[in-house]
Amino acid sequence: MLVSRIVTLAARAAGISGQGQTLSQDMTQTAFDALNAMVGQWAAKRWLVYHLVDSTVNPCTGALSYTVGPSGNFNLSARPTDIESAYVSMYYGTPQRIDTALEIVKAREDYNQISLKSLSTFPSILYYDNAYPTGLVYAWPVPTSIYALTITVKMPLPQFANLTDDINLPAEYQEALVYNLAARLRVLYQLPIDAGVVALATAALGTVRAANTQVQRLKIPDAIGRGGRFNVYSGQ
C-alpha cells in the first residue's frame, strides 16, 4: 500500500474528508508529517518493532567506546534508542566461534561506579549511551583484538520520503497506521475524540503487539536465592 493511500484512508476515518473529496495540499502535508512523526515514536517501542538486527565490530580495537549509528563503528542506518542484548565472541568467523552474553547496564551512574574503566580482559558488561546523533557503546572490561563485539538493536521503522513510497511493513501494520493516524488528525484539527476511531486504533496496535512480543525466560541471580551479596558487574 502506498503512503498516499494510508493518508487518504486516515483522513476519511478522521472525518476531515468525505467520499469523492480531495485533500488540499496543506492537509495532505499535515497528514504526511503526522504519519512520519507517529512512526518515529513507534520505532522507540520494542513491541512495535517486528525485527531485531545484529551489528558487529570485528575485531575490537581496545577502545573504551564505539560509535553506533550512520557511519559509526556499528554502522546502522539510524541511531538506536536502546541495546536489546549484546555478546562478545572468540574465534569470530570460524566454526569454533564462542559467544558469551554481556550484562546490559542501563544507567550511566552504574557505569561510573567502575573504578578502573581501562581494565582490559574478557568483558562482562555493556553500557549504551544513546547520545544523539551517534550513540556510544562501552564494554567492560575493555575487549582487545582477539574479540568481536555484537549488539542487538531494534530494526529502524521506515521514514517516508514522499507520498508515492510503498509501505514496506508487515500486513498487520496497515490498519494500525490508518486508525492511529486518524486519531492524531482529529486532535490536530481540534475535533472531538471519536470513540470508534480510538477503539479501532487500540485494537490494531494490540494485533501488532501480539505479533511482535517476545518474552524472555525469567532469570534470578544465584546470590539472591542463597542470601549472599550480589555483584551486578561480575554476576557473582
Image (tube, rainbow, N blue to C red):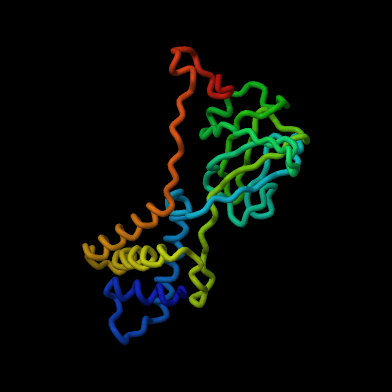
Q: Nearer the viewer, residue 136 or 55?
A: 55
Q: Residue at x 44, y 71 (%)?
A: 32
Q: In which quarter of the image is the C terminus?
A: top right
**Residue 40 appears left or right of 143:** left
Whole-percent x and y of residue 41? 44, 55
Whole-percent x and y of residue 86? 59, 39
Q: Quadrant of the N terminus?
A: bottom left
Q: Nearer the viewer, residue 20 or 226?
A: 226
Determine the residue located farthest toward the front in the rendered image.
95
**Residue 16 appears left or right of 217:** left
**Residue 178 appears left or right of 102:** left
Number of labelled discs? 0
Q: Residue at x 44, y 68 (%)?
A: 33
Q: Residue at x 46, y 29 (%)?
A: 219
Q: Nearer the viewer, residue 198 or 225?
A: 225
Task: Judge whether 145 appears above or below 49 on screen.
Answer: above
Q: Which residue is drawn at 63% across and 33% down?
A: 100
Task: Judge whether 160 appears above or below 66 on screen.
Answer: below
Task: Judge whether 179 appears above or below 84 on screen.
Answer: below
Quadrant of the rendered image containing residue 67: top right
Whole-percent x and y of residue 160? 51, 68
